[in-house]
Amino acid sequence: FIDTADVYGMGRSEKLIARLLRERPRDRIWVATKAGRKLPEQTLAGYSMTNLVAWVEESLTNLDVEAIDLLQLHCPHPAVFDSAEVFGILDDLVAMGKIRYYGVSVETVDEARRAMVHPNVQSIQIIFNPFRIKPASAVLELAESKEIGILARVPLASGLLTGKLSASSTFHKED
């Protein structure tokens, strides 16, 4: 299972994954990619059929696959969570065979709960690590009851839990 996004390296990450898929044709590698962060400004209107189809088509080309295993909306505008129309477009993309499943990468517990209202959401990606444990009590049980998968975002707390950082670690001035 590989999780990426269309904006990681502006498509480069997806193209590298395509190379891996070609090099390992006998292995079943599930690929999740995200879409929506290419908008110049996050708005509900940005999650139109035109934009969603264009993002999916570009990811299909980058990944060199016929269908995306899991497409996740990438921390969308808050109004998206309450838009049956946007989730209907995702249902249409499933029906068209362009994506197999869809989910949402979220910022907050509230967004996770609002996304899980939509019946065909298959996954929620939420920040979950020893520093951010609220999802354990606020999201996991609901997700389990709805048979929605959880993907941990930032499980190593942006590197803090890798063991590579210490009190004497220094960072570039722009970091």
Image (spheres, rainbow, N blue to C red):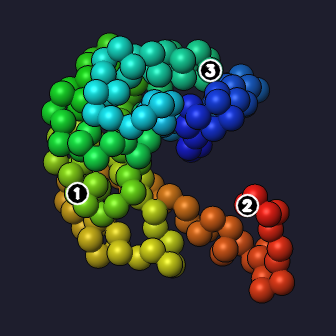
**Residue at image coords 24%, 29%:** 86
- Give the residue at mark 1: 113
Amino acid tagged 2: Asp
Amino acid tagged 3: Asn
Q: Percent position (x, y) of residue 1?
A: 56, 44
- Frontmost of labels 1 and 2 is 2
**Residue at image coords 63%, 65%:** 158
Side (left or right) of 122 relative to 164 = left
Q: Disc 2 and disc 3: Cα gap in Å? A: 29 Å
- Give the residue at mark 3: 62
Side (left or right) of 133 relative to 117 = right
- Give the residue at mark 2: 175
- The residue tagged with tag 1: helix, strand or loop? helix
The answer, for residue 35, to whether it is visible in the render is no
Q: Are marks 2 and 3 in contact (CB under 8 Å)?
A: no
Amino acid tagged 1: Arg
Q: Disc 1 and disc 2: Cα gap in Å? A: 32 Å
